Image (cartoon, rainbow, N blue to C red):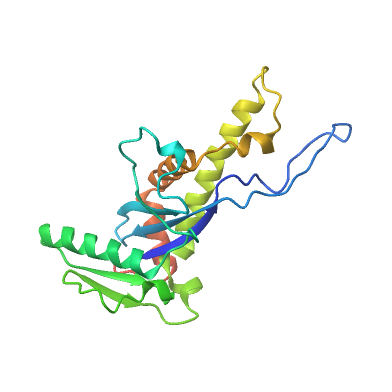
């Protein structure tokens, strides 16, 4: 199963606990977003994330030779048909080299419709309309778990700087300094932390499972 989700990588939690006497200062939530394509099998195996952002070569990528994810960019920072098609073709070729064939389940998002892409080793099947929230394994807790691990890392990073006695910035100001590279690395780690048992259980929950 493959499914996309947006991650607002500079957004802090909606609320927190504080003393009544403390000076409290709110702020608008950051809308900075990356899109991630999550891919996993019913056996619990996961494929590297496919990350999409607005800039092809952001400054934070300078001197970075390798990313633990596939990366692409477009103006909307969202999945597009040509990006999905290129990703499918590359994976199809790799599967051919490994002499493997797979069935890939996706929702009926227009970006997933790839009529001009010839696939030999991937059979693409679309879930019925209006059923993805019930049937799609990634929507049964897989993506939610990955996001929870990501936001845990984000909170720890911000708190680490807040606790620094030399720091004078607020949590919101610190979060604004999280770069797309920081977000990609944290999300890759979060995806790695999602274990095979969680993935298999989410497949079972969606009732698309063969024991």
Using residue 35 as the reference point, say whether residue 120 is left or right of it: left
User: Residue, x 56% and y 44% (percent of image)?
Assistant: 151
Which quarter of the figure is the C terminus placed in? bottom left
Q: Nearer the viewer, residue 148 or 211?
A: 148
User: Residue, x 59% and y 44% (percent of image)?
Assistant: 10
Q: Residue furthest right?
A: 21
**Whole-percent x, y for residue 19 in the image:** 83, 33
**Whole-percent x, y for residue 97 in the image:** 11, 58
Using residue 10 as the reference point, say whether residue 84 is left or right of it: left
Is residue 207 visible to us here? Answer: no
Which quarter of the figure is the N terminus placed in? bottom left
Q: Residue furthest bottom?
A: 129
Is residue 186 visible to us here? Answer: yes
Using residue 22 as the reference point, say whether residue 41 is left or right of it: left
Q: Is residue 21 above or below residue 78?
A: above
**Whole-percent x, y for residue 143 in the image:** 47, 57
Q: Is residue 75 above or below residue 131?
A: above
Q: Is residue 80 above or below residue 22?
A: below
Rendering quarter of residue 169: top right
Q: What count of labels does the image hold? A: 0
Q: Is residue 181 above or below residue 199?
A: above
Using residue 201 as the reference point, say whether residue 87 is left or right of it: left
Q: Residue furthest top?
A: 166
**Whole-percent x, y for residue 174 in the image:** 63, 34
User: Residue, x 68% and y 17% (percent of image)?
Assistant: 165
Rendering quarter of residue 37: bottom left
User: Residue, x 32% and y 62% (percent of image)?
Assistant: 42
């Amino acid at each position: 199963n493959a499914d996309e989700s947006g991650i607002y990588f500079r957004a802090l939690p909606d609320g927190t606990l504080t003393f009544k006497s403390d000076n409290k200062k709110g702020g608008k939530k950051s809308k900075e977003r990356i899109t991630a394509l999550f891919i996993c099998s019913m056996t619990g195996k996961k494929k590297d994330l496919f990350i999409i952002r607005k800039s092809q070569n952001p400054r934070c990528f300078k001197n970075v030779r390798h990313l633990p994810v596939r990366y692409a960019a477009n103006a909307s920072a969202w999945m597009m048909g040509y990006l999905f098609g290129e990703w499918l073709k590359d994976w199809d070729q790799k599967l051919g080299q490994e002499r493997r064939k797979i069935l890939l389940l996706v929702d009926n998002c227009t970006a997933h419709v790839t009529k001009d892409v010839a696939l030999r080793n991937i059979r693409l099947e679309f879930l019925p309309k209006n059923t993805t929230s019930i049937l799609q394994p990634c929507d049964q807790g897989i993506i939610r778990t990955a996001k929870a691990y990501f936001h845990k890392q984000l909170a720890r990073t911000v708190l680490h700087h807040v606790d620094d006695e030399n720091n004078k910035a607020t949590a919101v100001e610190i979060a604004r300094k999280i770069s797309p590279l920081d977000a990609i690395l944290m999300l890759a780690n979060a995806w790695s932390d999602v274990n095979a048992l969680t993935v298999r259980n989410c497949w079972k929950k969606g009732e698309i499972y063969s024991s």
